[in-house]
Structures are given as structure tokens and as C-alpha cells.
Image (cartoon, rainbow, N blue to C red):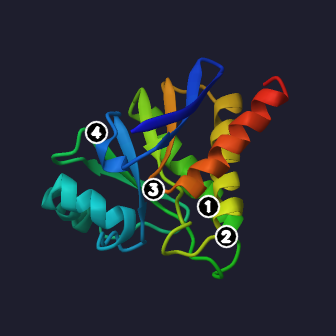
């Protein structure tokens, strides 16, 4: 894992990390899930391959999660304790920005309700769901920022994680923008 930038907002660090989210040592990682919670490809497939079948089995018991919402399972053999499965929109289905905001907010809310201290979030919907990386990462970043500014949370660290350098570059530029504004 390569930490690229770190910025503190109201007692919580917002950190951009380049690397494999399945290696994150946090209380919860967020899975970019589909509504049926079938974790075959992308980030979801990697999480189940590394964490073990129990993650898929627990997801099967939940069965369904609507777009814009999130649910939680254990993390199996991962270093994290929980996997929060956030269902972002497929690009082109309509109202994508609000659905992505809702998915990220739902994940952060679950983490706070569970009194977690750290969470790692990928660029939900910007992979196989086709959400353009620039606009998608902006929505994710802005939602995390608004959450930190306007809500009380147990979270001490929100990590924005991607294996992809282009995606990390977007996140880094948003943090630098924030720093240049003196926030």
C-alpha cells in the first residue's frame, strides 16, 4: 500500500492510498457490489477470492441490496473485520450522481453505526459499471467530505483506495484542491 496524501478534517483523516483494497488493515473495506450481491468480478470478485467463500455465503443470506444502499458482512480471511457492500449505479441508468452519493453515504453511515474507526473505499461504479472516473471519484470524494463536515462519526480515518494510478490521481487532486483552499 502506498499512502499518497493525508488530510485531517474535524478529527478524521482523509487518506488517498494506491494499492489492493483487500490488503487494507482497517475495520471495514467497502465492496463495489451489484444489487444481487453476487461477487464474481472486479473489486467484488477479488474480495471474495481473498477473503473466502463466507463473504459470498453471508451475502447470499442477505440476498438483495438496492442501488444507492449498502449492507455489511464479515470479512472472512481479510485483514479487515467487515465488508460493507455498497451498490453504486451503472452508468446510463439515470440519476447516477445521486445514486452514487447515496451508496457512499450508506457505507459511511453503517461504519458509524457500528462504531468503526477506519474504512477503505474504492472508486465505486467507476470500473465495470462504467461511471467515468473523473466525475465518479469527485462524487465519492465530495460525499466523504460532506459527511465529515456535517455529521458526528466514530471514524478516525477514511481511506480512498485504488490500485489504478489514474483514479488515485483524481483523489489526490481533490485533496490538494481542499488544502489550497485552507480547509
Q: Earlier in the sequence, mark 2 or mark 4?
A: 4
Q: Does residue 144 sit above or below 68 in this rendering?
A: above
Q: Whole-Å distance between the Cαs marked 2 and 3? A: 16 Å
Q: Whole-Å distance between the Cαs marked 2 and 4? A: 29 Å
Does residue 62 appear in the picture of this structure? no
Residue nearest the viewer, comparing 175 with 95: 175
Give the mark toward the camera: 2 or 4. Answer: 4
Image point (69%, 36%), residue name: 175
Characterize the local packing of mark 3: few (<14), some (14-19) or many (20 or more) Cα atoms within 10 angstroms. many
Q: Whole-Å distance between the Cαs marked 4 and 3? A: 17 Å
Q: Which mark is residue 70?
A: 3
Residue nearest the viewer, comparing 158 with 16: 16
Instruction: Name the residue beneath numbered marker 2.
Output: 96
Rendered-image quadrant of the C terminus: top right
Instruction: Name the residue beneath numbered marker 1.
Output: 100
Q: Which mark is residue 80?
A: 4
Amino acid at each position: 500500500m502506498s499512502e499518497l496524501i493525508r488530510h485531517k478534517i474535524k478529527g478524521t483523516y482523509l487518506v488517498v492510498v494506491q494499492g489492493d483494497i483487500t490488503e487494507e488493515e482497517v475495520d471495514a473495506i467497502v465492496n463495489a457490489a451489484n444489487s444481487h450481491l453476487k461477487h464474481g468480478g472486479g473489486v467484488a470478485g477479488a474480495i471474495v477470492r481473498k477473503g473466502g467463500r463466507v463473504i459470498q455465503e453471508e451475502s447470499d443470506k442477505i440476498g438483495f441490496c438496492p442501488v444507492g444502499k449498502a449492507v455489511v458482512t464479515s470479512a472472512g480471511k481479510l485483514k479487515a473485520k467487515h465488508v460493507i457492500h455498497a451498490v453504486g449505479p451503472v452508468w446510463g441508468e439515470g440519476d447516477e450522481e445521486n445514486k452514487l452519493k447515496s451508496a457512499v453515504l450508506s457505507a459511511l453511515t453503517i461504519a458509524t453505526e457500528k462504531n468503526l474507526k477506519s474504512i477503505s473505499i474504492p472508486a465505486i461504479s467507476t470500473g465495470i459499471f462504467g461511471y467515468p472516473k473523473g466525475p465518479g471519484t469527485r462524487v465519492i470524494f465530495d460525499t466523504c467530505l460532506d459527511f465529515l463536515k456535517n455529521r458526528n462519526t466514530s471514524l478516525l480515518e477514511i481511506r480512498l483506495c485504488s490500485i489504478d494510478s489514474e483514479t488515485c490521481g483524481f483523489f489526490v487532486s481533490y485533496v490538494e484542491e481542499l488544502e489550497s483552499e485552507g480547509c
